[in-house]
Amino acid sequence: MVLQEKVRPAAAPAAGGGILRGTIQVLGELLITAGIILLLFVAWQLWWTNVESDAKQSEVIKEFAQDFGGAAPETPDAAAPPAVEDFGAPVVTAAPGHAGTIGIMYIPRFGANYTRPIVQGTTGDVLDTLGLGHYANTAMPGAVGNFAVAGHRQTHGAVLDNIHTLVPGDKIYVQTKDGYYVYVFRNNQIVMPSRTDVLEPVPTLPGVTPTESFLTMTSCNPRFGAEERIIAYALLDSWRPASAGPPAEIAAQVAAAIGKG
């Protein structure tokens, strides 16, 4: 004879289990939503802020070009042997007011299309929109002392994204309404954000009287962080007045920059 088990009615689900499952489901949905919002924020930071800043910086360059005539001066023949030129001591442009445009920086190492405006000040309204910001308490282009600028690495135009790729001997060109200043990159340095001595008239040497013209560029380090600062140092090599036209090496870049207007 086959014995049959007595069938017992199924137990009702515990009320606490349903609440727990509901809570987990809500938390899961919230985490997914938070992840989407985070991704959108990263996209805005790394892409859209660059798009907006690039457009604004093009406008700044256009306005700068219009201020000194709107057209690039006649450029020298790049194929011709370089002439020995002595234009005397560099003319030093007077510093503009806050957010005023000083000039344009060209760095061939960063690409043939690299042209960035240099604007007075290092506050957010300058660095987040207008381009490279000039430390107002440092020298102007061509002056004896330390011409120091700051720029973002990955956002808001990423004006100094490739600062780590510079090698000794690279030329950095600064154009103002008075002329062109050619700096030669010397070395870089990683420091903590508190190291403001890099902005001294002789970088890292407080109290020393300068006899040379330095260019110091500062940006965040590492590329996707801000725990440190990367500093690039260069020395003035030569200058030429605006009436002499741009150096042959950047003649095409200057023409293209002015053409943005």
Image (cartoon, grey):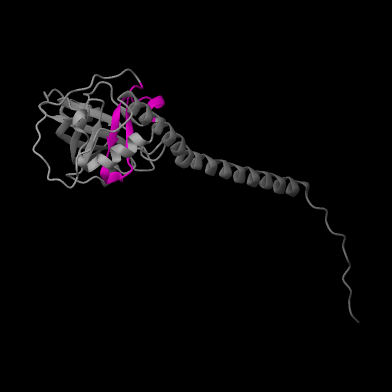
Q: Residue furthest top?
A: 97
The magenta region covers 99-127
Work out whether residue 117 can be spotted. yes
Give percent across and percent down for residue 1. Answer: 91, 82
Q: Is residue 217 left or right of residue 213?
A: right
In terms of depth relative to the viewer, which is nearer, 230 or 111? 111
User: Does 104 appear in magenta?
Assistant: yes
13 to 87, vertically: above or below: below
Give percent across and percent down for residue 74. Answer: 24, 35
The residue positioned 34% from the left and 19% from the top of the image is 98
Quadrant (top left/top right/bottom left/bottom right) for the C terminus: top left
The residue positioned 14% from the left and 22% from the top of the image is 207
Give percent across and percent down for residue 136. Answer: 28, 21
Q: Residue furthest right?
A: 1
The residue positioned 19% from the left and 45% from the top of the image is 78
In terms of depth relative to the viewer, which is nearer, 42 or 143? 143
Q: Residue furthest bottom?
A: 1
Q: How many marks are shown on the rendered structure?
A: 0
User: Does 111 appear in magenta?
Assistant: yes
Give percent across and percent down for residue 153. Answer: 36, 39
Work out whether residue 229 can be spotted. no
Q: Is residue 168 left or right of residue 103?
A: left
Q: Is residue 46 left or right of residue 197?
A: right
The residue positioned 20% from the left and 44% from the top of the image is 170
User: On the image, which quarter does residue 216 sit in?
Assistant: top left
In terms of depth relative to the viewer, which is nearer, 95 or 15? 95
Q: Is residue 48 left or right of residue 190?
A: right
In terms of depth relative to the viewer, which is nearer, 234 or 260? 260
